[in-house]
Amino acid sequence: MYKNSTDRRFLKNKREFRRAYIDLTIQKGYRNFSIAELARQADLNRMTFYKHYDNLDDVF
């Protein structure tokens, strides 16, 4: 489920996850990476991912 907020940190984190998702998709192909890899690429904590999304499909 896609979660919404107008908090600036929340929006920044979502933007970073989306950028990392696109970068990893280009590098590794669609869905050939884990949430942990996505979090590392975004330079955010894996648990932060779950505050914004339920699964990788929700990012894009």
Image (spheres, helix red, strand yellow):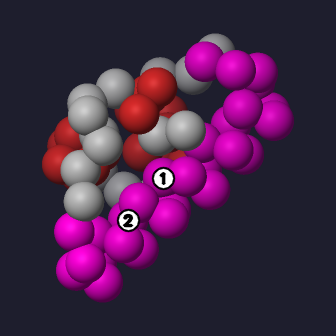
- Which range of residues does the magenta coloring cover? 5-31
- Looking at the image, which residue is at 36% across and 72% down? 11
- Label 1 sits on a secondary structure element that is helix
Position of 13 relative to 52 (above/below): below
- Which residue is the extreme one toward the top? 32
Dominant secondary-structure state across the stretch colored magenta: helix
Crowd around label 1: few <14 · some 14–19 · many ≥20 (10 Å): many
> Which residue position holds label 1?
17
- Give the quadrant of residue 1: top left
Quarter assignment of residue 14: bottom left
Identify which residue, 28 or 22, lies in the foreground.
22
Residue drawn at x 55%, y 52% as measured from the top left: 18
Residue 30 in view:
yes
Q: Amino acid at mark 1?
A: Phe
| Residue 46 visible to the viewer | no
- Which residue bears the numbered disc 2? 13
